[in-house]
Amino acid sequence: MQIKKQIPNLLTLLNLFSGCVALLYATQSNFTAAFGFVCLGIFFDFFDGFFARLLQVSSPLGLQLDSLADMVTSGVVPGVVMYTMLVESAGTSTTLFAQFMPYFGFVITLASCYRLANFNLDTRQTDSFIGLPTPANALFILSLPLVAIHSESMMVFEFLLNHAVLLFITLLSAYLLNAEIPLFALKIKGSNWKAYKLQLGFVLYSVVLLVFLNITAVPLIIMSYVLSSILHNRWENR
């Protein structure tokens, strides 16, 4: 019985381990490996909750462990990646602004911490989300350097490494994490597929984008997730 209770916690700790490895790669500017381990961490993050519900072993300890693991994988790692990108955008400039600007990237980490703490207390987020979930935000941030690196367009590369653009993305990320914007969850409970048309349609849309656009699809999928949620909310509230 005790072993069954610890299965979700083990998966949560694997999420944390993946985040720690991703953090090491992020500090080395190996964004591809960092992205891969964050994806692995998010995979474990999804299934720890799945097995907790399946085995009926949800607990306050598991809730706290989940947020602590997410803080590393989906909070610290994207902050480090944004910091590194801002360092690259500063180049060889020795101005005071250029020296201190990269630290602004950790606003993402601070906003993620606030969101995770608030999530544990917010009873409205059992079947949906209020604000952008930290894993989705992490995927968005970590995909940016990969899009820049693999883009065949120098214009895209320069745009994504422009310090003004990166600072704007940082502020937008911090806002969306804690905004009072209801966002649908991708969890499907039960066999009433008609009730989950939005979720299933979005998954299909995401798969198509990934097939045709590869890594470039990731930021588009996250932005589409937010926009489709806003449009769905307006439709429902008509």
Image (cartoon, rainbow, N blue to C red):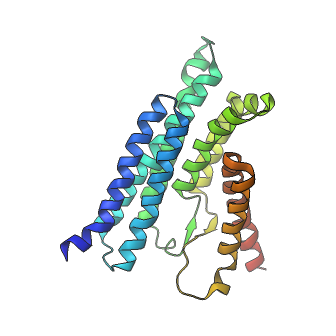
Picture layout, residue 60 above or below residue 178: below
Which of the two residues, 206 or 220, is positioned nearer the viewer here? Answer: 206
Does the rendering let one see residue 110? no
Residue at far front of view: 211
Task: Pick the quarter of the image with the N terminus.
Answer: bottom left
Relative to 143, 116 lies left or right: left
- x and y percentages locating residue 231 in the rendered image: 76, 68
Q: Residue at x 61, y 50 (%)?
A: 175
Residue at far bottom of view: 192
Does the rendering let one see residue 156? yes
Label tally: 0
Q: Residue at x 69, y 49 (%)?
A: 214
- x and y percentages locating residue 34 in the rendered image: 49, 40
Name the image quarter holding residue 15.
bottom left
Task: Pick the quarter of the image with the C terminus.
Answer: bottom right
Name the image quarter holding residue 205.
bottom right
Residue at far left of view: 2
Which of the two residues, 64 or 188, is positioned nearer the viewer here? Answer: 188
Picture layout, residue 172 above or below residue 104: below
Which of the two residues, 233 or 158, is positioned nearer the viewer here? Answer: 158
